[in-house]
Image: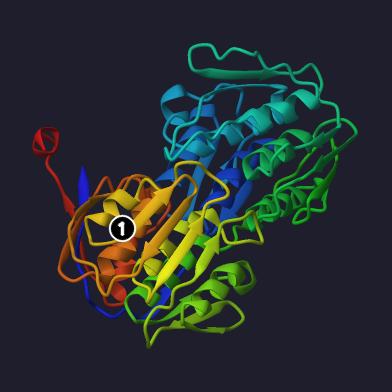
Amino acid sequence: MSKYRVQGGNRLEGTVRIGGAKNACLAILPAVLLSDEPCRISNIPNISDALVSLDILEALGARIRRIDKSTVDIDPTSVSTHEVPHDLARQMRASYYFLGALLGRFGEARVALPGGCNFGVRPIDQHLKGFTALGATVPAVVTNGMIDASADCLIGNSIYFDVVSVGATINVLLAAVKARGITIIENAAKEPHVVDVANFLNSMGADVRGAGTDVIKICGVQHLHGAEYSIIPDQIEAGTYMACAVATGGDLWIENVIPKHLESISAKLIEMGAEITEADDAVRVRMNGPIHACNIKTMPHPGFPTDMQPQAAVLLALGDGTSIITENIWDNRFRYIDELRRMGVQATVDGKIAVFQGVPYLSGAPVRALDLRAGAAMMVAALAARGQTEIEDIHFIERGYENFVEKLHAIGADICRIDIPDAVARHA
């Protein structure tokens, strides 16, 4: 086990480079299984979830050759099994993408119920609804913690999602690209990583149109060829560093980003008083005055992303008045506020609404990362706080932020990663 130790109060300045998008990467790696030839994927983030995805591909029989720290060659031609090992699937939420990819390749798939962050019920019923519409059989009862799906032949169909779901949109994309006929997904998710997955599939010879809108049309093809593809930059990693700049009164150039993907985040930070300058593939965030109170409602893209909600909450906790966050995507995503209260945050939660009364400063304290983005919020708070903060359960953070300590240290943070001996951790 390990923890982060942060001495807060330093103003962050300089340049930070953003890695590949976690949420795109975790769908694109399984998508390689649909190819009849090797693929080269670059801009893979150095995060634990990406490493688990590569481990799953190897366990299935794919040959992996690392070119450099962010580029791998993947040869899926030797994959012969449709079952993902239980111990690997349970390590992350996005393991469910192997259901769509394996179903599209073999006509059958067996994957354990996914793991990942626990911040409320996140069913995969819309995924299974999509598979069923394509002609797959999915047992109503989960056996031994495994989800089974099979089809003699996948047939294109019209699918309307009851709720907007990024995961279901991508999973049906994966299953439908080799199905016979035309598949139309209505009420589809429009997030940048949905578009990135569609672009990757098209680079292999798929026929996917309309990604980025709420209607996606997929004309099934028989074969997909190999491709070289670079994953888009991570919108949420970029947004987190933007929040760090605001929280510390900093001045950061954030490079390797797509500014348009950050528009909803930038708009709220500007409302809080930040000065944001856009370049072709970078944004500059400067904060010279107090943080202004404002209200935030999380929404599907292009609205304010739920994955930035905890980081934004820290900023509003330091605001100059009363602010309200309404969480419209996930239940129970405000659990982390109990941890922030240890640092002096004043907030009340009622269901999906949190009300923040701004305080002049936060104080360092021992806190835990309850999930990936809650952990990022603890980091933002620790950097802004007076005194020392220790953050435990950092394995959640390292699921989605590459080289976090090194990147923060390079822009002025006083931070280190401390390994806790197992014997000490067990008795803590």
Looking at this view, name the residue that lies furthest to the right.
181
177 and 411: which one is in front?
A: 411
4 and 141: which one is in front?
A: 141
Q: Which residue is mark 1?
A: 378
Q: Quadrant of residue 115?
A: top left
402 and 324: which one is in front?
A: 324
**Residue at horizontal 70%, vertical 46%?**
226
**Residue at horizontal 86%, vertical 31%?**
156
Position in image of residue 40 (x %, y %)? 60, 51
**Residue at horizontal 37%, vertical 83%?**
290
Position above or below: 36 against 211: above
Position in image of residue 273 (x %, y %)? 46, 82
Could you tell me which secondary element the residue under label 1 belongs to?
Answer: helix
Side of 257 where 393 appears, left or right:
left
Position above or below: 292 against 218: below
Q: Quadrant of residue 182?
A: top right
**How many discs mark residues in the rendered view?**
1
Residue 74 in sight here? yes
Position in image of residue 224 (x %, y %)? 77, 41
Position of the C terminus by quadrant: top left
Position above or below: 157 against 14: above
The amino acid sitting under disc 1 is Met
Position of the N terminus by quadrant: top left
